[in-house]
Image: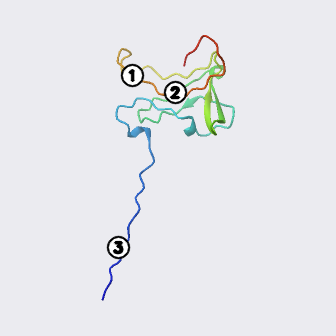
């Protein structure tokens, strides 16, 4: 008598990548920033959407800082609330009059009446 062995393979889903979402224009994740130590100035924040719309800043004084282990052990990009910013270029692939959504995680450290992203 011959027994045939059947071995079941466990198939794990691939890790999620933002580029898998159809219609996504921009995806930024501080946890995916490479090459910066704690308090390093962020000159380029790579776009994970697959569209190549990296957020950039060329002026040293206006660069936000990369901070490690800030929110539940994850890194953040910290803007000083004064002059830090990252530019996204002129063309993100949609008109400013088109409807769009932004999903982000923010932690404020002040109760000032002027708030923004």
Q: CA distance from mark 3 to mark 2?
A: 51 Å
Q: Residue at x 60, y 26 (%)?
A: 107
Q: Residue at x 59, y 28 (%)?
A: 43
Which label belongs to residue 58?
none
- Mark 2: which secondary structure? strand
Q: Residues within 10 Å of mark 2 (few under 14, many from 20)?
A: some
Left or right relative to 33: residue 89: left
Q: The N terminus lies in which quarter of the figure?
A: bottom left
Q: Can you give x and y, in whole percent of width and height, for residue 112 in the image? A: 64, 13
Q: Disc 1 marks which residue?
A: 100
Coloration mode? rainbow
Q: Which residue in the rendered view is the most extreme toward the right?
A: 39
| Nearer mark to the viewer, of 1 and 3 | 3
Q: Can you give x and y, in whole percent of width and height, for residue 23 in the image? A: 35, 31
> Which callout, 3 or 2, points at the residue further toward the start of the chain?
3
- Mark 1: which secondary structure? loop
Q: CA distance from mark 2 to mark 1?
A: 18 Å
Count numbered badges in the picture: 3
Q: Could you say which is closer to the camera, residue 45 or residue 106?
A: 106
Label 1 close to label 3 by CB (< 8 Å)? no
Q: Could you say which is closer to the camera, residue 80 or residue 85?
A: 80
Q: Could you say which is closer to the camera, residue 101 or residue 3?
A: 3
Q: Disc 2 marks which residue?
A: 55
Q: Can you give x and y, in whole percent of width and height, for residue 116 in the image? A: 55, 16
Q: Could you say which is closer to the camera, residue 81 or residue 4?
A: 4
Q: Residue at x 66, y 22 (%)?
A: 109
> In the figure, residue 98 lies in which quadrant?
top left
Q: Disc 3 marks which residue?
A: 6
Q: The C terminus lies in which quarter of the figure?
A: top right
Q: Can you give x and y, in whole percent of width and height, for residue 11 in the image? A: 40, 58
Label 2 close to label 1 by CB (< 8 Å)? no
Q: From this view, report whether residue 14 is shown above or below residue 17.
A: below
């Amino acid at each position: 008598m011959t027994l045939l062995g059947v071995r079941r393979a466990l198939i794990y889903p691939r890790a999620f990548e933002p580029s898998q979402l159809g219609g996504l224009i921009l995806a930024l994740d501080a946890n995916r920033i490479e090459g910066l130590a704690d308090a390093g100035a962020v000159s380029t924040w790579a776009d994970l959407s697959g569209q190549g719309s990296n957020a950039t800043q060329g002026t040293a004084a206006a660069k936000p800082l990369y901070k490690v282990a800030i929110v539940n052990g994850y890194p953040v990009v910290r803007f000083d609330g004064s002059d830090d910013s990252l530019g996204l270029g002129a063309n993100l692939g949609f008109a400013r009059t088109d409807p769009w959504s932004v999903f982000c995680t923010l932690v404020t450290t002040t109760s000032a009446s002027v708030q923004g992203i």
